[in-house]
């Protein structure tokens, strides 16, 4: 890799010059020593400028790739990130609509079903009395009318419930559409990640030339704070593979009972 | 029995509302986060609180702490219904005084069990 080469050059020049520098100083040739220090500085600067240059170029092409620079002509088109955001909002909208449509249909069907169940139970009780010959002629005529009404009603209402069930089935068509959208966004995220990783690697070269040391401890603390529990993390995707996460309601119940619940 | 349902997703509120209605609890109200829920709790005579954890504005765990810190609300039974599944979080909720904890996705049966268990304990 070319970064390692330029860094290797820098390091070998550094070693060579350092050795010469010590020798010059020991021999009292201060002029030479100053010249060596100057050369050392130049090598370091050259490497640094080169790395910063590369980083800048890479950053620029990343910006062009993602079309996030408003001064670029492509800015008229929506940037891919904005586009991805819109696509995900579309997924949220679509799934919400499907959920509401399904619940509407269920709420519409439930009273029909419980109405039929109640009527059937009542009729069946009266029918039992009829079979036991406990029903008079007048009451029987009334019972026959109710049976006829029930049959007509159950025909139209079960047809309605069947239609609702069919519509519930159709309301699940969002899965296909959202699946496609999510796949495309996932692809973009992967691309962005690999490009960002490249930039980070280049930036780390600059850090080495410039001798910048990061306080990893404080970076980690900052990250931990962001992950504070109270914020919530949302659904756990790999609950079964993680020790610190419960894998279901049974686990929750066990944990709570171990706490005295 | 008046129940407040707090969740930032209207579909989830609707699901819980429907399940509660099936269990015979028809008097429910809804809020979309802790910030809107708290004044409702303070001014309305709610007997039960069902809340999500992760919400914009005030989270469910903060709402729970506010409820327990309020003299008039501190005995209100609180059931947490949430996707948060870290052990530490469940312990945190327990320490904050939650009465029940249901992880999403859940079934009608689980919700029923937990609610009944809470009332059993509250009434005994």
Image (cartoon, coloured by chain):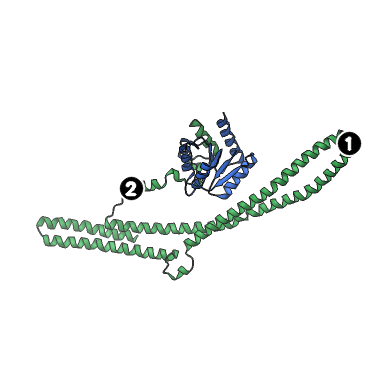
Chain colours: A green, B blue
- Chain holding disc 2: A
Name the residue nearer the viewer: B102 or A218. B102
Name the residue nearer the viewer: B34 or A191. B34
The mark closer to the camera, 1 or 2, is 1
* Place of residue B110 in the rendered image (x, y in percent of width and height, measured from the top left): 59, 38
* Place of residue A160 in the rendered image (x, y in percent of width and height, measured from the top left): 73, 51
- Chain holding disc 1: A
The residue drawn where x is 22% and y is 57% is A14
* Place of residue A230 in the rendered image (x, y in percent of width and height, measured from the top left): 44, 43
Name the residue nearer the viewer: A24 or A221. A221
| Location of mark 2 (residue) | A218
Contact (CB < 8 A) between labels 1 and 2? no
* Place of residue A212 in the rendered image (x, y in percent of width and height, measured from the top left): 28, 54
N-terminal of the two: label 1 or label 2? Answer: 1
One can see residue A195 in this view: yes
Count of numbered circles on the image: 2
Residues at marks 1 and 2, CA–CA distance in whole angstroms: 91 Å
- Image position of A251 (left or right of A125): left
| Location of mark 1 (residue) | A136
């Amino acid at each position: 890799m070319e970064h390692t080469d330029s860094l290797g050059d820098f390091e070998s020049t550094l070693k060579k010059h350092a050795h010469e520098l010590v020798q010059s100083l020991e021999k009292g040739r201060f002029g030479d020593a100053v010249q060596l220090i100057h050369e050392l500085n130049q090598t370091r600067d050259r490497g640094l400028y080169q790395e910063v240059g590369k980083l800048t170029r890479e950053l620029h092409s990343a910006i062009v790739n993602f079309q996030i620079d408003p001064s670029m002509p492509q800015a008229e088109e929506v940037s891919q990130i904005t586009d991805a955001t819109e696509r995900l909002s579309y997924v949220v909208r679509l799934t919400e609509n499907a959920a509401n449509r399904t619940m509407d249909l269920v709420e519409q069907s439930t009273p029909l079903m419980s109405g039929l169940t109640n009527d059937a139970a009542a009729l069946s009780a009266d029918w039992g009395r009829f079979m036991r010959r406990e029903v008079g002629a007048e009451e029987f005529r009334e019972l026959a009318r109710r049976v006829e009404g029930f049959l007509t009603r159950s025909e139209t209402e079960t047809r309605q419930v069947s239609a609702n069930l069919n519509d519930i089935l159709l309301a699940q068509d969002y899965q296909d559409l959202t699946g496609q959208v999510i796949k495309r966004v996932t692809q973009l995220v992967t691309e962005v990640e690999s490009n960002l990783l490249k930039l980070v690697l280049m930036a780390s070269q600059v850090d080495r030339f410039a001798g910048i040391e990061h306080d990893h401890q404080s970076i980690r603390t900052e990250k931990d704070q962001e992950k504070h529990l109270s914020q919530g993390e949302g659904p756990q995707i790999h609950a079964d593979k993680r020790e610190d996460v419960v894998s279901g309601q049974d686990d929750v119940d066990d944990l709570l009972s171990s706490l005295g619940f | 029995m008046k129940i407040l349902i707090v969740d930032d997703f209207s579909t989830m509120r609707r699901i819980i509302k429907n399940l509660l209605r099936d269990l015979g609890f028809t008097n429910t109200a809804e809020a979309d986060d802790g910030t809107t829920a708290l004044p409702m709790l303070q001014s309305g005579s709610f007997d039960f609180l069902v809340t999500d954890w992760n919400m914009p504005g005030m989270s469910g765990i903060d709402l729970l702490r506010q409820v327990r810190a309020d003299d008039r609300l501190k005995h209100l039974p609180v059931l947490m219904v949430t996707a948060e599944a870290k052990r530490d979080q469940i312990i945190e909720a327990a320490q904050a005084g939650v009465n029940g904890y249901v992880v999403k996705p859940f079934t009608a049966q689980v919700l029923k069990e937990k609610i009944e268990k809470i009332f059993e304990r509250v009434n005994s």
